[in-house]
Image (tube, helix red, strand yellow):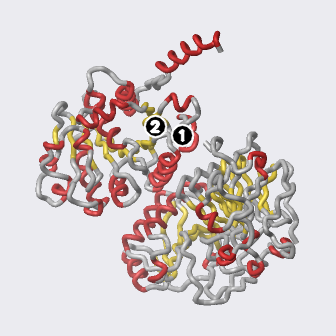
């Protein structure tokens, strides 16, 4: 049985889908057999981020309705054959699937794949319940904003109530410069409230937008980016490796040091 | 994060005393810079219409609550250093002697006698030891009208699960649980869910007490023993309004209450852990938090104004004691030390350092 991990957040727009796409790809690059499941029925995006939109033929609902076999619905990634996507139906709503069906689907997939990543929809309604029903572990994605953290806290509580005890935290889109001047919650501020083991900090990076629009996960790009490296590190930590956290202040730190060095004599 | 918010008056520190109208409380904007303390102050007509400062507590009105004016809703919390320093007497009428105002409801003198009293929509599944047995007491079956108000079954189950996660040490593993379903309809799936949640907490569902035939059939089919006569438990609040139960034994929880979690208990509550923002505790007795208090707490919820709230780190969003409401201080204190919130003789909620605090003798 593979590990079934749900990627969730409560609040929308914090980077669940981006995280799923990048972690799925990063794990696949480490030669694991990975299946990513889009549980956002009616608002599917994961296929876009992976650049697989035009390969989607069947969806999870088709499998459940018996209109195709599971293997037919799994879309093989064009770059990595050991990464597959189970797309969500776009013409349905979240109520078209129930948790029991979701468990059944995931159980069938987890038999074959090492990792099953489930991309949860925002909110805590039916779609969320479906997404977490089959999971053993959870990755909580949050941004350093008070609303995102509050929602993440609620979601962690719900996960505990659903007996998913193994949760780790990803803090996404952090801007070290803003943290420095106290305009943004720091990693410590977030951890202090959520009290969940931290598995990664991903800096805010414009290249994420570019990669999203291109359908090329950041971890694929030839020249390494800070955000891409952060995702790769998270993938390694998921596998139990001890990887030190990126020092996000490196560049700015140097700059700042030079700046203070030059300004000091004057000021 | 609160540091950069503008404060209405800079020198007010933690003693700023802006009356909170119940409506304001709902929207809870403590740092609203345009919130003029004077204009929003006393008895405006809309205040008196919303005279229940605690909207979600449909407990029967205590005898004292009649002469309780909405103005007794107190204010931004004065903080420890100056517990009783000259607080602007935010509209509390002079005649309104707080000592009579906050009289405790003597146990057993519940005035409410209407048998058709509305069911508390906030009722949760309660776990209780009584007569040497462990009981899970379900809220009564909601009427059609109340169905939309009360918690759904899923919510009830989730709350129960969260609670059981918190106090797994209160009973021996493997204990049998009697389910007091009363007139609540339970189908076999719901019974199964209940049994699963109890099993996860190492409790065994053993016997179901119900007055409904359907529930009895479902329970018997699932293999539980069924009892169709309902023993009188103190917790089951007989509908004839004769509620003689003093406070229940304290509830001890070892958990972090996260956003959305809510604990209701008809006794004191002790939490070893934090109350995160967005969580709440409603207790008829005292509330003691061995950790950080950042949620909403309501002590003495049945009208006991001598109840207190104590926390190692007091940073509440809002504190309610009996019928008093106060919002948390806009500026968190610089030094952190254990503090106690209580109702002063002036009828305000005030915070004092735990070291200096001794329970005021009301009446």
Give the left or right position of residue A115, taking residue B259 as reference: left
Examine the rendered structure and indicate whether residue A83 appears above or below residue B116: above
Which of the pair A173/B167 is nearer the observer?
A173
Q: Which mark is residue B304?
A: none
What residue is pinned by disc 2? Answer: A171
What residue is pinned by disc 1? Answer: A190
Whole-Å distance between the Cαs marked 2 and 1? Answer: 8 Å
Chain under callout 1: A
Task: Give percent across and percent down for residue A226.
Answer: 39, 25
Examine the rendered structure and indicate whether residue B324 appears above or below residue B220: above
Say whether residue B299 is visible. Answer: no
Q: Are marks 2 and 1 on the same chain?
A: yes
Task: Give percent across and percent down for residue A148.
Answer: 47, 47
Q: Earlier in the sequence, mark 2 or mark 1?
A: 2
Which of the pair A71/B186 is nearer the observer?
A71
- Judging from the image, what secondary structure is the residue with disc 2 in? strand
Task: Give percent across and percent down for residue A204.
Answer: 42, 32
- Cβ atoms at labels 2 and 1 below 8 Å apart: yes
Q: Badge 2: how crowded within 10 Å, few (<14), some, or many (20+)?
A: many
Which of the pair A198/A207 is nearer the observer?
A207
Q: Which residue is depicted at the point 49% across and 21% down? A: A252
């Amino acid at each position: 049985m593979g590990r079934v991990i749900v990627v969730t957040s409560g609040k929308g727009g914090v980077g669940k889908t981006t995280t799923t796409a990048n972690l799925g790809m990063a794990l696949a690059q480490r030669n694991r057999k990975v299946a990513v499941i889009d549980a956002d029925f009616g608002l599917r995006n994961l296929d876009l981020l992976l650049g697989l939109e035009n390969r989607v033929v069947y969806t999870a609902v088709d499998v459940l309705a018996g209109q195709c076999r599971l293997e037919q619905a799994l879309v093989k990634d064009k770059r990595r054959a050991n990464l597959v996507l189970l797309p969500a139906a776009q013409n349905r709503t979240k109520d078209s699937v129930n948790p029991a069906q979701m468990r059944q689907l995931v159980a069938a997939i987890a038999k074959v794949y090492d990792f099953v990543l489930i991309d949860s929809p925002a909110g805590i309604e039916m779609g969320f319940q479906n997404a977490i029903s089959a999971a053993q572990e959870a990755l909580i994605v949050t941004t350093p904003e008070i609303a995102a953290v509050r929602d993440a806290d609620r979601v962690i509580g719900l996960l505990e109530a659903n007996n998913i005890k193994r949760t780790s935290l990803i803090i996404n889109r952090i801007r070290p410069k803003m943290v420095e001047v106290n305009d943004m919650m720091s990693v410590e501020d977030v951890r202090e409230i959520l009290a969940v083991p931290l598995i990664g900090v991903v800096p805010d990076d414009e290249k994420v937008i570019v990669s999203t629009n291109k359908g090329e996960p950041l971890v694929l790009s030839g020249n390494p980016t800070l955000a891409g490296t952060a995702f790769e590190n998270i993938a390694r930590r998921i596998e139990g490796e001890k990887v030190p956290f990126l020092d996000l202040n490196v560049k700015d730190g140097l700059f700042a040091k030079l700046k203070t060095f030059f300004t000091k004599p004057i000021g | 994060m609160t540091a950069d918010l503008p404060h209405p008056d800079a020198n007010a520190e933690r003693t700023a005393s802006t009356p909170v109208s119940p409506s304001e409380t709902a929207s809870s904007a403590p740092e609203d810079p345009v919130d003029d303390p004077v204009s929003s102050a006393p008895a405006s007509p809309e205040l008196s219409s919303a005279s229940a400062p605690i909207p979600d507590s449909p407990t029967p009105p205590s005898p004292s609550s009649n002469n309780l004016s909405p103005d007794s809703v107190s204010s931004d919390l004065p903080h420890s250093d100056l517990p009783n320093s000259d607080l602007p007497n935010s509209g509390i009428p002079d005649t309104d002697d707080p000592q009579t105002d906050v009289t405790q409801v003597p146990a057993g003198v519940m005035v409410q006698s209407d048998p058709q009293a509305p069911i508390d929509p906030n009722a949760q599944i309660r776990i209780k030891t009584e007569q040497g047995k462990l009981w899970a007491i379900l809220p009564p079956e909601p009427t059609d009208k109340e169905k939309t108000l009360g918690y759904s079954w899923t919510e009830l189950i989730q709350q129960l699960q969260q609670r059981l996660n918190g106090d797994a040490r209160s009973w021996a593993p493997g204990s049998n649980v009697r389910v007091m379903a009363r007139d609540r309809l339970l189908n076999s799936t719901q019974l199964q869910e209940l049994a699963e949640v109890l099993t996860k907490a190492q409790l065994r569902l053993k016997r179901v007490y119900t007055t409904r035939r359907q529930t009895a059939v479902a329970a018997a089919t699932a293999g539980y023993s069924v009892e169709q006569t309902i023993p009188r438990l103190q917790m089951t609040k007989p509908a004839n309004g004769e509620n003689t139960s003093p406070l229940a034994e304290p509830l001890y929880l070892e958990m972090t209450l996260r956003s959305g979690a809510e604990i209701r208990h008809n006794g004191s509550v002790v939490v070893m852990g934090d109350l995160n923002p967005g969580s709440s505790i409603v207790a008829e007795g005292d509330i003691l938090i061995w950790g950080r208090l950042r949620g909403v707490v309501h002590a003495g919820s049945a009208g006991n104004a001598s109840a207190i709230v104590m926390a190692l780190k007091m940073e509440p969003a809002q504190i309610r004691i009996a019928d008093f409401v106060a919002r948390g201080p806009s500026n968190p204190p610089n030094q952190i030390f254990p503090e106690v919130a209580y109702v002063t003789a002036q009828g305000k909620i005030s915070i004092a350092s735990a070291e200096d605090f001794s329970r005021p003798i009301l009446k």
